[in-house]
Image (tube, grey):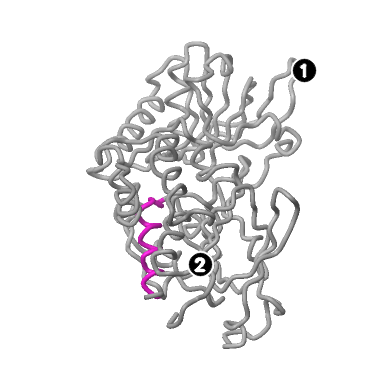
Amino acid sequence: MATSPGHVAVLGAGPVGLDAALAATDAGLSVTVYEAGAAVGAHVRAWGHVRLFTPWRLNASARMRTHLAGAGRDLPEDAAYPTGTELADHLLGPLAGLPALAGRVRLGHRVAAVARASLLKHEHIGSSTRAAAPFRLLVDGPDGEYEDHAGLVLDCTGTYATPNSLGDGGIAARGERALAHRITRTLPPLTAEPDRWAGTVLLVGAGKSAQTAARGLAELPGTRLEWLVRSPDPDWGEVPDDSLPERQRLVDVSRDLAAGGHERVTVRTGARVTALAPDAGGRVRAAVSTATGPHEIVADHVVALTGYAADSALYRQLQVHECYATGAPMNVSAALLGSAGGDCLAQPAVGLETLRNPEPGFYILGAKSYGRLNTFLLRGGYAQVDEVAAAWA
């Protein structure tokens, strides 16, 4: 990108989106941030009760710190571990209130689709004609839909709002769709409402969100936990000599629970939900396939923490090359799959050419750029913003 991109549209006012907006203003560019939620960091606030296993020093970019310091605002101690709410209150909210972003963040405005003005997806492939056409954004706002235009679009919308199904193979189990209203798909605030989780809880998933939920549910005296894990021999995402102690503690607790270390917890490995059905008593019956044969679990609550997938419908009319396995942009996915053995701290810095899509001027940044890979850290998203911003200089 050798010339100024003109107006910049940033989709999402989470950490990476706000950092991108600051980078644009630092470069003297006009920018609009579109946020579907009622406040900046809406996704972060949705899991605000959860404490991160990364400290403050990994969760704020140098650019953010510079802008906050210029306004006389200090972040908490670098070694402290923030909750989602603390991250939003101490970092995202103050950033959005800075003069640099005044009037640039539109809350309650969801970008429904992005296209090239006057062009379809298959037209002018790799040509200067396509690169010269402005982006057309269809936006749903508080007063109805409208359209905007931009010369550069940065999709920082993340993946949190698109949860995966709990059934075998990643699609819905039989009966799952009909019981969608009975399934919790985000990490709930367990300590804030312990009585809600009385009875038997069926938990599906093995990632860090599921491990956090299992740890919390095991501590509730009125709760019995049935935890289903797909892998027959899970490693719980352990990283040798982990430098993030909070992450290692989750692994240790999960191993203890799986080893029968808690009388109110049963962990079934190599297990898959094949069907869900309502029970006459208002509960949910889950048919489960296990290594020892079929099993039935009758649960008062179902919590499915099986990961999240990026929503690509937003840019279906743009020329984006996606990885067939991860759903991430192909070049980014290739770089990440070949590195680090799954340790998020060892992910490589990806350059501008890796971040580019066949669609000129359209970048997917942050967690969404990782697709189904679960190794994203905020500092990786900030490094991506640095790469794109350097091209504006």
Exactly how many numbered labels are in the figure? 2
Q: Quadrant of residue 250?
A: top left
| Residue 135 image point, x, y percent | 62, 72
Q: Quadrant of residue 204?
A: top right
Camera-side residue: 221 or 341? 221
Q: Which residues are magenta?
A: 375-391
Taken as a whole, is the magenta stretch helix, strand or loop?
A: helix
Mark 1 element type = loop
Q: Quadrant of the C terminus?
A: bottom left
Mark 2 vs mark 1, CA separation in Å: 59 Å
Q: Is residue 80 above or below residue 381?
A: above
Q: Residues within 10 Å of mark 2 (few under 14, many from 20)?
A: some
Mark 2 element type = loop
Q: What residue does disc 1 label?
A: 280
Instruction: Give the residue type at disc 1.
Output: Ala
Q: Give the left or right position of residue 232, taking residue 380 as reference.
A: right
Which label was assigned to residue 30? Answer: 2
Q: Residues within 10 Å of mark 1 (few under 14, many from 20)?
A: few
